[in-house]
Image (cartoon, rainbow, N blue to C red):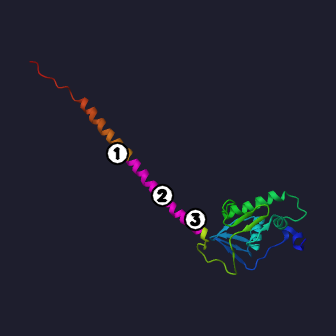
């Protein structure tokens, strides 16, 4: 066993640059925080450690055993499988990722996990403003813009239906008034011969 592996959770991962970026996310290793487009995400210690371990292995499979050794010392007695699953799921949730259609974290069945996006390492923070996104996120934004036009169409359909209902009510009221007015007239009495 490696000397680092024996320390388990005490092992600190230090990657080659202070800032790591992928998609709209930025990791600041010195402050141990993750931001999405400038907004801070609240990642608990083990969730943050899983993210760093995935970035460290970038593109390679991070095995469940490697995760277990990094997150829990040998003398810790927990249900490792359930805790690894829970921790990875919390990370996916924080990143807005899905195990069905992964953008960031792919599950490799019976082996572990893999970071599928290539991170960028830099000594400088991202400039203020919206983060540069990857092509899948650009595609999702385009789909979101395309979805906004049907909403406008739905609004006009709703207005049209309401206008037809009001017009029908007014027409019905007018016909009813004429009908009632016809019977309100006094009967015409012919003079007696």
Discs 1/2, front? 2
Query: What stretch of residues is rendered in magenta?
Result: 137-163
Viewer-closest of 77 and 80: 80
Residue 167 numbered tag = 1
Q: Which residue is mark 3?
A: 140
Q: Whole-Å distance between the Cαs marked 1 and 2?
A: 25 Å
Alpha carbon distance from label 3 to label 1:
41 Å
Category of crowding for the residue at label 1, using alpha-carbon neighbours closer than 10 angstroms: few (below 14), some (14–19), many (at least 20):
few
For this view, does 55 lie left or right of residue 65? left
Q: Is residue 155 left or right of residue 171?
A: right
Residue 40 place in picture, x, y as percent = 67, 68
Question: In what element is the residue under mark 1?
Answer: helix
Residue 59 occupies quadrant? bottom right
Quarter of the figure with the N terminus: bottom right
Check residue 140 for magenta coloring: yes
- Residue drawn 87% across the image and 73% down it: 4
Residue under the point 73% across and 61% down: 90
Residue 168 image point, x, y percent: 35, 42
> Which of pointers 3 and 1 indicates the residue nearer the eye?
3
Secondary structure beneath label 2 = helix
Question: Where is residue 48 shown, x and y percent of the image?
Answer: 75, 67
Front residue of 145/32: it is: 145
Q: Which residue is mark 2?
A: 150
Of labels 1 and 2, earlier in sequence is: 2
Residue 30 inside the magenta-drawn segment: no
Which residue is most to the bottom?
123
| Mark nearer the N terminus (2 vs 3) | 3
Q: In terms of image quadrants, where is residue 58? A: bottom right
């Amino acid at each position: 066993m490696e000397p680092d592996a024996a320390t388990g959770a005490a092992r600190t991962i230090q990657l080659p640059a202070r800032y790591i970026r992928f998609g709209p996310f930025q990791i600041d290793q010195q402050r141990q925080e993750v931001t999405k487009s400038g907004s801070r995400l609240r990642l608990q210690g083990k969730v943050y450690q899983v993210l760093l371990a995935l970035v460290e292995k970038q593109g390679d499979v991070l095995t469940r055993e490697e995760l277990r050794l990094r997150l829990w010392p040998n003398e810790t007695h927990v249900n490792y499988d359930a805790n690894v699953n829970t921790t990875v799921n919390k990370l996916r949730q924080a990143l807005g990722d899905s195990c069905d259609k992964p953008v960031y974290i792919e599950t490799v069945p019976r082996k572990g996990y893999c970071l599928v996006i290539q991170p960028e390492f830099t000594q400088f923070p991202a400039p203020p403003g919206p983060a540069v996104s990857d092509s899948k996120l650009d595609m999702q934004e385009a789909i979101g813009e395309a979805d906004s036009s049907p909403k406008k169409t739905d609004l006009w359909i709703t207005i049209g239906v309401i206008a037809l209902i009001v017009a029908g009510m007014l027409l019905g009221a007018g016909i009813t008034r004429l009908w009632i007015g016809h019977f309100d007239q006094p009967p015409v009495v012919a003079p007696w011969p």
